[in-house]
Image (cartoon, rainbow, N blue to C red):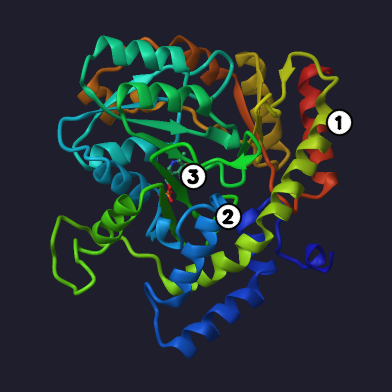
C-alpha cells in the first residue's frame, strides 16, 4: 500500500487513514456542492438519508432517516420526539460513552442507571425489568447502547419495552454495521441513533449523526425538531433546535455507506488476526460474536485481571501502541453526575467490568504487523511477566 510508505501517516490513526483514502470523494463532494449551490440540508442530505434508511431496513420510507449535527443531538432529539421532558426518568446503562447521559441531561431528564449483563458491556434485560417494576409508571424511555459494536439483547429488550409501553431508543453510535438476527441493528427501537464522528464505523470528516424513526409521524416530528420547529412553509409550529447535517458530510457519508460492508469485513479480519495471536494467552478474554448477533468491532475490547490490565496498558503505551480505556469511569462516577444523582448505585456487573477492560487498536486498515506488535506487548506482560 503506497500510502503506508508516506512519511507522516500513522498506521494506528483511523481518521488520518480515512482522510487520505477518501480525499478524492471529499473533492467530489465539494464539486457537488458547487453544482447544487446548496451547503446545508440540500440534495446530498436527502440522498444520504434515503440510502441510509434503505440500508437499515428496505421497508422504511426514504424520509425515515433524519440527518442531524452529531450523535448526542440524535439521542436528545429522539428522546424529545418520544415525549421525554424535564424530570422524566430515562433508563440507560452507566457504562457507555458519557454522551449518552449528556443527551438525557440536556433535556432535563433524570438518569436511572441499569446494570450490565454479566461479563457483557450491554444492558441486562432482567435488571431493566426490575428497575421498571420498582419505579412504577416513572420510566419514560429506555436507551439500549450497543457498546463497542456488540449488540444488546434486542429481542428481550424490545419485548419488555413493548409490554410496558415504554419507547425503546437504540444508541447505535458504536454499532453501525453490527447485525442482530442477520439485520443491521437499528430496526428494533422506536428510534435508532447514530453518530458519524470521525472515529466511527461510518465516519464523516467532521461531526454528523442521524436518527432513524420507524413511524412517518416520528420522522416528521424529528425533521421539525432539528430545524427550529419549522414546518415545510418555514413557520415554527413546535419546539425545535438547530441540528442540521451539512452537504459535505452527507455526500461523503453516501460514498462511504457504499463501502461500509467491506469495511466491516476488514474490521472482522483484523479481529480474526487478534484471535489468532491472542487466543492462547492466559487470563485474557477476547470479544466475539453472539448466538444472535455479529460484532462490527468498532472497538476491540479485551478483558483481563485488573492488575494485569494496568500493566498491559502501560506496556502498550511504552511501545507507542495507542491502547486505551473505554471507559475509565462509568457515567454515575463522573463528578457532575455523582453530585446530582448520587454515586451509590447498585451496579455490580458494571463495577466488576470497568477495571478489567482494555481497548486494543482496531480499524479496517490496520496492518497485520501492527496486530503482531500489540500481541508481543501483551505476551510480554501475560506470559513473560515483564
Ligand atoms: C455510545 C455513544 N453514544 C453517543 C455518542 C455521541 O456521538 P457524538 O460524539 O457524535 O455526539 C457517542 C460518541 O462517541 C457514543 O460512543
The residue at 84%/18% (across/down) is 384
Report the disc number at residue 124: none
Q: Nearer the viewer, residue 83 or 296?
A: 83
Please give the residue where the numbered disc 2 appears in the rendered image: 55
Q: Nearer the viewer, residue 204 or 356?
A: 204
Please give the residue where the numbered disc 3 appears in the rendered image: 173
Query: In this rendering, would 291 be left or right of 249?
Result: right
Mark 2 to mark 1 CA distance (whole Å): 32 Å
Give the image location of residue 140, x and y in percent: 25, 29
Give the quarter of the image for residue 5.
bottom right
Mark 2 nearby-residue class (10 Å; few <14, some 14–19, many ≥20): some
Give the quarter of the image for residue 80.
top left
Give the image location of residue 160, x and y in percent: 40, 21
Viewer-side label of 3, 1:
3
Q: Quadrant of the N terminus?
A: bottom right
Secondary structure of the residue carrying tag 2 is helix
Q: Nearer the viewer, residue 254 or 311?
A: 254
- Respond yes or no on whether mark 3 lies under 8 Å from ligand 1: yes
The image shows residue 87, relative to residue 138, as above or below, that is below
Please give the residue where the numbered disc 1 appears in the rendered image: 276
Give the image location of residue 103, x and y in percent: 31, 41
Q: Quadrant of ligand 1?
A: top left
Viewer-side label of 2, 1:
2
The answer to whether residue 222 shows anywhere in this view is yes
Amino acid at each position: 500500500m503506497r500510502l503506508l510508505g508516506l512519511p507522516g501517516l500513522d498506521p494506528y490513526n483511523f481518521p488520518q487513514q480515512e482522510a487520505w483514502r477518501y480525499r478524492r470523494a471529499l473533492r467530489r463532494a465539494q464539486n457537488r456542492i458547487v453544482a447544487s449551490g446548496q451547503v446545508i440540508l440540500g440534495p446530498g442530505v436527502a440522498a444520504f438519508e434515503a440510502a441510509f434508511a434503505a440500508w437499515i431496513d428496505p421497508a422504511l420510507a426514504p424520509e425515515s432517516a433524519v440527518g442531524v449535527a452529531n450523535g448526542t443531538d440524535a439521542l436528545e432529539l429522539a428522546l424529545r420526539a418520544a415525549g421525554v421532558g424535564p424530570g422524566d426518568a430515562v433508563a440507560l446503562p452507566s457504562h457507555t460513552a458519557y454522551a449518552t447521559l449528556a443527551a438525557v441531561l440536556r433535556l432535563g431528564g433524570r438518569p436511572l442507571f441499569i446494570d450490565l449483563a454479566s461479563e457483557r458491556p450491554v444492558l441486562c434485560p432482567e435488571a431493566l425489568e426490575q428497575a421498571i417494576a420498582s419505579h412504577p409508571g416513572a420510566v419514560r424511555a429506555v436507551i439500549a447502547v450497543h457498546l463497542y459494536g456488540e449488540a444488546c439483547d434486542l429481542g428481550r429488550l424490545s419485548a419488555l419495552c413493548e409490554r410496558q409501553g415504554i419507547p425503546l431508543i437504540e444508541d447505535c453510535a458504536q454499532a453501525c454495521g453490527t447485525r442482530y438476527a442477520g439485520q443491521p441493528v437499528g430496526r428494533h427501537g422506536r428510534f435508532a441513533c447514530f453518530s458519524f464522528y470521525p472515529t466511527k464505523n461510518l465516519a464523516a470528516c467532521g461531526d454528523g449523526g442521524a436518527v432513524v424513526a420507524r413511524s412517518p409521524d416520528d420522522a416528521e416530528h424529528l425533521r421539525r425538531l432539528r430545524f427550529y420547529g419549522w414546518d415545510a412553509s418555514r413557520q415554527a409550529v413546535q419546539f425545535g433546535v438547530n441540528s442540521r447535517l451539512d452537504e459535505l458530510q452527507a455526500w461523503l457519508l453516501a460514498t462511504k455507506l457504499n463501502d461500509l460492508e467491506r469495511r466491516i469485513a476488514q474490521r472482522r479480519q483484523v479481529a480474526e488476526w487478534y484471535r489468532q495471536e491472542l487466543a492462547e494467552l492466559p487470563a485474557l478474554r477476547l470479544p466475539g460474536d453472539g448466538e444472535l448477533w455479529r460484532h462490527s468491532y468498532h472497538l476491540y475490547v479485551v478483558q483481563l485481571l485488573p492488575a494485569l490490565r494496568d500493566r498491559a496498558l502501560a506496556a502498550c503505551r511504552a511501545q507507542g501502541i495507542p491502547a486505551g480505556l473505554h471507559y475509565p469511569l462509568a457515567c454515575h462516577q463522573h463528578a457532575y453526575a455523582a453530585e446530582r444523582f448520587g454515586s451509590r448505585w447498585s451496579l455490580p456487573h458494571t463495577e466488576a467490568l470497568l477495571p478489567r477492560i482494555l481497548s486494543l487498536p482496531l480499524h479496517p486498515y490496520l496492518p497485520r504487523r501492527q496486530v503482531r506488535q500489540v500481541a508481543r506487548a501483551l505476551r510480554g506482560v501475560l506470559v513473560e511477566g515483564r
